[in-house]
Amino acid sequence: MEKYICEPSHTFLNLPEEKRLRIIREAVCEFGEYGYQRASVNRIVQRLGIAKGSLYQYFTNKEALFIAAFDHFSELVKKTVRSDRDPKGDFFYQVSGVLHSGYLFLKKYPDFFLLYSRVLAEEDTPHREMLIKRFHLFSVEYFRPFLDSGKASGLIRTDVNNALIFFMVEALLDRFFRECRGGSVSGMFGNDNPDDSLTQIIDQLVGVLRVGLGTTRI
Amino acid sequence: MEKYICEPSHTFLNLPEEKRLRIIREAVCEFGEYGYQRASVNRIVQRLGIAKGSLYQYFTNKEALFIAAFDHFSELVKKTVRSDRDPKGDFFYQVSGVLHSGYLFLKKYPDFFLLYSRVLAEEDTPHREMLIKRFHLFSVEYFRPFLDSGKASGLIRTDVNNALIFFMVEALLDRFFRECRGGSVSGMFGNDNPDDSLTQIIDQLVGVLRVGLGTTRI
Amino acid sequence: MEKYICEPSHTFLNLPEEKRLRIIREAVCEFGEYGYQRASVNRIVQRLGIAKGSLYQYFTNKEALFIAAFDHFSELVKKTVRSDRDPKGDFFYQVSGVLHSGYLFLKKYPDFFLLYSRVLAEEDTPHREMLIKRFHLFSVEYFRPFLDSGKASGLIRTDVNNALIFFMVEALLDRFFRECRGGSVSGMFGNDNPDDSLTQIIDQLVGVLRVGLGTTRI
Amino acid sequence: MEKYICEPSHTFLNLPEEKRLRIIREAVCEFGEYGYQRASVNRIVQRLGIAKGSLYQYFTNKEALFIAAFDHFSELVKKTVRSDRDPKGDFFYQVSGVLHSGYLFLKKYPDFFLLYSRVLAEEDTPHREMLIKRFHLFSVEYFRPFLDSGKASGLIRTDVNNALIFFMVEALLDRFFRECRGGSVSGMFGNDNPDDSLTQIIDQLVGVLRVGLGTTRI
DNA sequence: TATGAATGAGAGTTCATTCAT
DNA sequence: GATGAATGAACTCTCATTCAT
């Protein structure tokens, strides 16, 4: 993992874990709600009930605080995905699994997810490219083995570029999660079914992928 | 087309076209670069070399200027797509056509495209939902006939929801254009071919769609 | 009547009377609603539907327009009071008469009255002292004969200074009209009688004056 | 005393008293000179020689500063009147006492008095009605016992409405103080006697009231 | 004579950051 | 180590007035 220009200070790291977490959580919340630029350090310290000077002793500036908040989130995502991992299924099963556990994650930590979308969305987010790339690499690293073995075993068309496959999968994940955040997933396809129709929708989406990218025929 | 609460003033509409366009263009540029909230009216008038008061005689407020800029862009996009339209091809041919002409458009007006992504991305953009919806409706309106006749003629699977098809197509368009903006299209798949490899990439993407959504077999 | 530094221009005086009156009326309205300083020339021309430049050709500046508006009002008041005048009654009857006709006036021309209160109230009104003094002089001029003959005929205490009598009468007029503007006159004494109780209230007020200042005993 | 939506911040309350008072005093001065709307926060901080941001850490906005300034003044007035109070005299004696101590107060704090007149005068003053009402209530609360016992003991006419009596007394107080502010009190009745003629004038005024409202005959 | 586009100073307010205590 | 008062540039928006057409 790269070192940032501005790591949290020792003062911060020596804080009791509870307080450290509260600070990170409030930061995630603020940055998620307003995006980096419009987020207000004032509001953060107000919500925390600590002095502005204190925060500036933990982090050299707004940017450092932001990076720390994002990092925490990003580690959490990876941990969650890894722990949910069921290594038995094929590539398409994995995609479907990530859609499911991603959905659960964003229902559980809406603030974290909001923060992530903000970073994706707002170009003036500091270190944006690095942060995004890290997620992309994680996704590649996660799906790669399944993709490789899929191609090896004849499950997946070998005439389609890996990069293009990642491109399509990430496009669908992105859009799916973005859509999720707003309203109910089912609502996005016009019907008013409750959340449990989620499985059907994911199945349909992945089904199309399976046909388009796979060798299986209908 | 709906009327907004705050149209540009007569003063603005009576301006010589050249000046009017310059103003819109600079606004698009600023809003594209910073997003609505962080964009600065100060900077805009500075770039234009006009007095702040003047701009406020053209538009009641920042929001009105923003809407005007976005509208100009949005009309231009529609006009471009419509004029490029080749009504002969099937649904997938149309998707491929839109990818092409969209690519050309964003190379020609990168600022406009930036603005669009900002709107998609930033939730505190005023009237965001309306602006996005309008694009979505345009896309539905454009593709719908081809989709319908495709299903009728047996070209396209009828067991896949229309909404889901739109979802996938828009997801790919979105991501494709977003990727385009950064570097060369070819760069996004790891190879350094010049732009003329664009056709191949689009063909591959649409090819996968054609298999996944269509009844044609490989 | 004194000449002002800035009379309305010939251009204005040559305007058709109807237009001239509309301009004055809108000005009265604006200055009444916002007071001199906060009144907006922009709004006035907007309401009138004429060009800002035009207004500035009629009046050299905001101040000149204001004076013209106030003058018109002030002439109207004097005309009204004079035409209502019933020279038969004694001093106290006259006071009561002015209270009545003042009340009717302010119900008929609330904007004019509002303008007057603004002038009384706001110290940064240009030429305020002159405008107020003119009203005071009018009041003195109006009441003086009745006061003199009242003292001569033994109706009014001669041991009370004329200036003090004017002071008291004007204080009551002022407060009475100020109170009137807000709600119903009757409301100001806590009872909810309709406007026709006005006569009783005025009678009571003047009654107290009559006892305090007069030689009549209860 | 009611709490306002926006009290001064802790930051302000923790300031050394001297500085706190300076700020209030300058605010009173500015609001008194220009009225609420035209008063300029810029000018206030300039006069104080502090940064604009500082003032906004003390008070959430212009309105809060205004209310704080008015409150300070209003408490001071009440304290002054109460401490001058001589509970021995009758109702008319009390009126005369308030005229005297009011006069002294406004000579001592002319800016405070100016502010008060502004509030009375300018309808777009925020919370105007509440501020005025509070003064009226204070006046009622102060005079009421004397008025009641006056009526009980047969000193005051019982056929005159209490509300009407308050109306007259307040009208005279208002006008008296307004007149005072401009020049010397004596000047207002045309003679050039020094301030010590004040007593005579007040005596005359109250004398008329005593006759008009009282049962005592000349 | 009438127009209305242009002006620019000044309004209230916010905010990341510093530093003496 | 913690505090929080102070800062001042930048923000959006308003307005009386001018002047070329």
Image (cartoon, coloured by chain):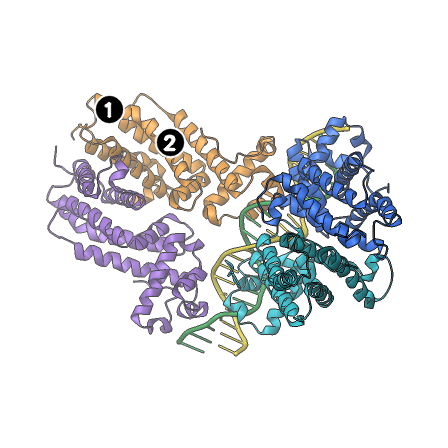
Chain colours: A purple, B orange, C blue, D cyan, E yellow, F green
Q: Which chain carries label 2?
A: B
Q: Which amino acid does label 2 sit on?
A: Ser
Of the numbered discs 1 and 2, the one sitting upstream in the chain is 2
Q: Where is residue B176 in the image (x, y as percent from the top left)?
A: 33, 40
Label 1, on which residue?
B150
Residue A91 location, x and y as percent? Answer: 16, 46
- x 41%, y 40%: residue: B128
Extreme residue in the right direction: C152
Depth check, front residue: D106 or D42: D106
Camera sees residue D2: yes
Judge the density around disc 1: few (<14), some (14-19), many (≥20) Cα neighbours within 10 Å.
some
Q: Which amino acid does the dot numbered 1 rest on?
A: Gly
Q: Horizontally, is C91 left or right of B1 in the view?
A: right
Q: Is residue B192 visible?
A: no
Look at the picture and state if A75 lies above or below C175.
below
Q: Would residue B69 be found to the left or right of residue B94 on screen?
A: right
Image position, residue A185 (x, y; %): 25, 42
Residue D102 or residue B109, whichever sits in front: D102
Give residue B186's quadrant in the image.
top left
Q: Compared with residue C195, is residue D15 higher up or lower down, i.e. above or below?
A: below
State the separation of the CA atoms marked 1 and 2. Answer: 22 Å
The quarter of the rendered structure image containing the C terminus of chain D is bottom right
Q: Which of C106 and A164 is in front in this view?
A: C106
Q: Nearer the viewer, residue B185 or B84?
A: B84
Q: Mark 2 points at which residue?
A: B101
A114 above or below B157? Answer: below
Residue at screen point 65% across, 44% down: C180
Drawn side of residue B44 relative to residue B109, left or right: right
Residue D44, x across and y down, in percent:
64, 61
* SS of the residue under disc 2: helix
